[in-house]
């Protein structure tokens, strides 16, 4: 990508096209140099982005990946649910590693909702309760959440009367008044879920979160106006999604989804920036498929091949350490997400993981229980769990592939794999990840 700042100052979104963990953090880090402001618009500390810069690994959960670039401004938008203690912990960890974090380069929306301690207890208690309930052949009804309190926090956001927002941490009398009511209700609800806990103490919680508010006060503000002011100055914005389109609360494999709109459709509501400003959407996909937690996964490999992909791709959660379920690339799912997100191009990550396999399979359709077939994704858990993948088989390529300098340097079979993806999804692959480091990315000029 070349040209003046005006040429490259398009507002860009980076969104996951699968079930998360596609490597969005690395791509955001690569793209940050082209943008002035980096914005996180959904999710919470349940999502993790891992970025490797000059061999140093950074695990980020709430703060946008752009924070690793000292001259950029990062914003946590109103669509995020913020665990303020985790946020402070993350800020301290970054500073300890020499990363610049101040109220000038990190801003938090005063409208973002707060993940409180009881949300985590509710999350875990409900998972335990539902895990003990079976639904016939489908097993337990547990969703497989990270137990970080994200779902209950979003539930309170919709309930309104039991919600706490970041701006409330700056108003001690108001916060104490709300805690008096909420703590009684939450204690009763936790007891009803079988949690043997002492009554929540509104005074102690008030002291604790008022102190947190004082610490975070320099970072909290009206980020909607800040973003519009930035656009008025001609600044370019990079929107960083968490989770992924197939986990979107409205358009994913419900109910095995997250609690926010994590496709590009969540950007306007999660930031206050109208969708008409978004001109470039880069969808991130792995060269294969993974999923963490419960829910249907048509191309899952429960054999040694799946284990091999997991180990080679280091497929363990950034936030939880949970092993991810691994399988062949599902192009039906990716094509659906491309459509849903309005993706204009794709970044294919972890391409190097597939080197060395004798042959590879790609799912191009689903066989339905009635014997018919479809090339359309089914965004419903009960419908998707009954399909069988229809595969194409492609030849593999030998190791190593890391030495490639551009797409033309790749093995012919590796290029053919990328060509097949492009043909199926109808948009170009703009970047190819051939290793974990920032530098191990084939970018625009190199990918034809």
Image (cartoon, grey):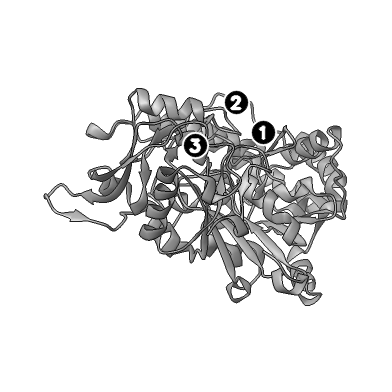
Question: Which residue is under mark 3?
Answer: 145
Question: Quick one: label 3, few (<14), some, or many (20+) residues within 10 Å?
Answer: many
Question: Quick one: label 2, few (<14), some, or many (20+) residues within 10 Å?
Answer: few
Q: Is residue 210 visible?
A: yes
Mark 1–mark 2 distance (CA, rounded to whole Å): 8 Å
Helix, strand or loop status at disc 3: loop
Q: Nearer the viewer, residue 44 or 56?
A: 56
Question: Which residue is under mark 2?
Answer: 197
Question: Which residue is under mark 1?
Answer: 200
Give percent across and percent down for residue 209: 78, 41
Q: Nearer the viewer, residue 304 or 74?
A: 304
Q: Are marks 3 and 1 in contact (CB under 8 Å)?
A: no
Can you tell which quarter of the image residue 326 is in? top left
Give percent across and percent down for residue 275: 58, 72
Residue 70, numbered circle: none
Q: Nearer the viewer, residue 429 or 93?
A: 429
Give percent across and percent down for residue 139: 29, 31
Mark 3–mark 2 distance (CA, rounded to whole Å): 21 Å
Mark 3–mark 1 distance (CA, rounded to whole Å): 24 Å
Q: Are marks 1 and 2 in contact (CB under 8 Å)?
A: yes
Helix, strand or loop status at disc 1: loop
- In the image, residue 379 sits, relative to residue 435, either above or below, namely below
Give percent across and percent down for residue 182: 64, 45
Q: Nearer the viewer, residue 162 or 410?
A: 410
Give the position of the N terminus as an image quadrant: bottom right
């Amino acid at each position: 990508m070349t040209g003046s700042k005006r040429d490259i100052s398009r507002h860009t979104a980076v969104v996951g096209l699968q079930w998360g963990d596609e490597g969005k953090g690395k791509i955001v880090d690569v793209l940050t140099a082209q943008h002035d402001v980096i914005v996180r618009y959904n999710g919470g500390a349940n999502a993790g982005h891992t970025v490797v810069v000059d061999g140093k690994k950074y695990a980020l959960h709430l703060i946008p990946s752009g924070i690793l670039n000292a001259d950029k401004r990062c914003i946590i938008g109103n669509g995020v649910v913020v665990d303020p203690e985790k946020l402070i912990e993350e800020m301290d960890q970054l500073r300890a590693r020499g990363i610049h974090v101040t109220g000038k380069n990190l801003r938090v929306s005063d409208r973002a909702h707060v993940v409180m301690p009881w949300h985590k207890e509710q999350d875990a208690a409900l998972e335990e309760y539902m895990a003990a309930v079976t639904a016939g052949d489908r097993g337990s009804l547990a969703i497989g959440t990270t137990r970080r309190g994200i779902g209950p926090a979003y539930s309170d956001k919709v309930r309104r009367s039991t919600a706490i927002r970041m701006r409330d941490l700056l108003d001690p009398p108001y916060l104490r008044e709300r805690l008096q009511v909420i703590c009684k209700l939450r204690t009763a609800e936790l007891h009803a879920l079988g949690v043997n806990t002492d009554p929540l103490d509104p005074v102690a919680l008030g002291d604790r979160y008022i102190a947190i508010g004082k610490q975070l006060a320099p970072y909290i503000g009206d980020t909607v106006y800040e973003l519009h002011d930035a656009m008025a100055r001609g600044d370019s914005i990079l929107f960083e999604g968490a989770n992924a389109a197939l986990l979107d609360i409205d358009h994913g494999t419900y109910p095995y989804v997250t609690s926010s709109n994590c496709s590009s459709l969540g950007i306007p509501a999660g930031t206050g920036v109208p969708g008409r400003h978004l001109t470039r959407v880069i969808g991130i996909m792995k060269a294969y498929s993974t999923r963490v937690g419960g829910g249907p996964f048509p191309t899952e490999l429960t054999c040694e091949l799946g284990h091999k992909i997991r180990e080679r791709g280091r497929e363990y959660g950034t936030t939880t350490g949970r092993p991810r379920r691994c399988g062949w690339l599902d192009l039906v799912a990716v094509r659906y997400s491309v459509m849903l997100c309005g993706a204009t191009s794709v970044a294919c990550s972890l391409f190097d993981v597939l080197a060395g396999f004798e042959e590879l399979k790609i799912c191009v359709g689903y066989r339905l229980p009635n014997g018919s077939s479809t090339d359309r994704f089914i965004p419903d858990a009960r419908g998707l769990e009954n399909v069988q993948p229809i595969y194409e088989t492609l030849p593999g390529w030998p190791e190593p592939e890391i030495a490639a300098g551009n797409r033309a340097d790749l093995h012919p079979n590796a290029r053919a794999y990328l060509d097949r993806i492009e043909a199926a999804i109808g948009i170009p692959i703009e970047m190819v990840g051939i290793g974990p480091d920032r530098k191990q990315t084939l970018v625009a000029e190199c990918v034809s």
